Amino acid sequence: MNYTITIYSVLSFFILFFCGKLSYRLNLLDIPNNRKIHSKATAYTGGIAISIILLGAITLFDDFNKSLSLILSIAFLISIVGLIDDRYHLNIGGKLSLQTIPIIYLVIFENLILNHIGEYNYFKLDLGAFAIPFTFLSVLFLINAFNYFDGIDGMLGLTSISVLAILYFLAFTQNTHFLVSEQNIQFFLIAVMIPIVFFLFFNFSFFKLPKLFLGDGGSLLLGFIISFVLIYFANQNFIHPILLAWSVVIFVYEFLSINIIRLKNNQKLFKAGKDHLHHIILKKTNSVFFTNFLICSSNIILFTIGYLSFLFINELASFIFFIVFFIIFLLLRNEYSIIKKKY
C-alpha cells in the first residue's frame, strides 16, 4: 500500500503540473478585477486536476467500496459544472440547476440519503418523508458553503484538510467493529487529502511552480465529496451525526451567518463580495498565513468543544452547544459588520 501511495503522490504532482501548464497555454485564467485580490491572471483548473487525480485513485486503491467510488466518480461531473461556471460566468440560477444533476443522481438513484440526524437522550430526529429533500438541500447548502471559502490562497484547501483530518480521527475513535470491516476508509480519506496537499504547493507557487487556483470546479468538488462522505459515515451508524456536523462547523456557521446578515441588510444572497470571514480577517491582519491559521484553527477548536461535550456530557449537550456557539458566532459577525458600516 505504501508503494501505491507513492505512485499516487507522484501522479498527483504531474497531473497538477500538466494542468497548470496547459491552462496558461489555453488561456483558462482568472482575470483580476476590482472584486478580486490577486494581481495576475491565474489558471483556475486546480479543481479539475484534482478531480482527474481522484478518478485515478479509484483504480489505484481498488479496495474502495461502491459508495465511496461512486462519490469520487460523480464528483467529476460537479467539477465540470464549476469549470463551465469559471469559463462562462453562469448566473446563480444556471449554476444551481447544473449542481442539482449529480446531487440528484447520488440521492435518488444510489440512495445516499440522510434518514435521521441523530438520537438525543429521549428522542430521535427521524426525517421520515422529508429525508430526500432534506438531504438534497443539505448537500446543496454545504457545496456552496465551501464555495464561499475560496477567496484567498490556501483557504479552502487547508480548511478542507482540517475537515478530512477530523473525519480520519472520528473514523478511528468511534467504532472498533467498523475499523475491522471497513479499513479502506483510511485510504479513501488519504486519497482525497493527497492531491489537495500537492495543490497547495501550486496555489502558493512554492519552488516557482505554475500558480493554480481551485476555481469553482475545485470548491464545488470538495464540497460535494465531503457532503456525501458525511452522509456515508452517518449511514454506517458508527459516528453520531452531531459530530459530523461539528467537523464542518466553520463552513456551516459562516454560510448561515453571512446570508442572514445579507437578508437583514436587504442585500442579494449568494452574491460575490468581500464580506466573507477570510476577507474580513485578511483586511484586519494583512496576513494570508495568519488568516488561514486562524480559520483552520477555529474549525478544529470548535470541533474539539463539540467532541468533548459529546464525550463527557452527552449527545444533547453537544447539539445545544452547536446552536449556542452559532448564535455567538452570528452576533459577533453582525457586530463587526455594523462597525465596518459606520466607518
Image (spheres, helix red, strand yellow):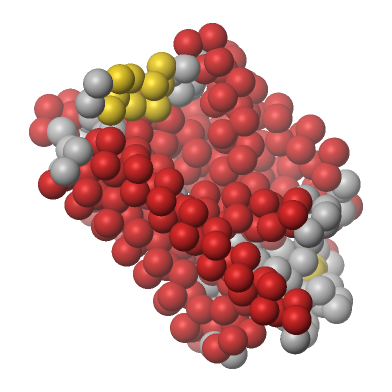
- Residue depicted at 56% across the width and 24% down the height: 134
Question: Relative to 123, does residue 120 appear above or below in the rendering?
Answer: below
| In the image: residue 203, left or right of residue 341 | left
Identify which residue, 323 or 46, lies in the foreground. 323
**Which corner quadrant of the image does residue 118 belong to?**
top left
**Which corner quadrant of the image does residue 262 belong to?**
bottom right
| In the image: residue 299, left or right of residue 205 | left
| Image quadrant occupied by the C terminus | bottom right
Residue farthest along the top direction in this orientation: 129
Q: Whole-percent x and y of residue 292?
A: 48, 75
- Residue depicted at 25% across the width and 36% down the height: 315
| In the image: residue 46, left or right of residue 233 | right
Q: Whole-percent x and y of residue 8?
A: 39, 54
Task: Judge whether residue 232 can be spotted in this image.
Answer: yes
Question: Relative to 51, does residue 28 appear above or below in the rendering?
Answer: below
Q: How many discs mark residues in the rendered view?
A: 0
Identify which residue, 6 or 126, lies in the foreground. 126
Q: Whole-percent x and y of residue 67?
A: 42, 25
Question: Relative to 59, does residue 127 appear above or below in the rendering?
Answer: above
- Residue depicted at 48% across the width and 11% down the height: 128
Identify which residue, 213 or 112, lies in the foreground. 112
- Residue depicted at 76% across the width and 38% down the height: 96
| In the image: residue 203, left or right of residue 69 | right
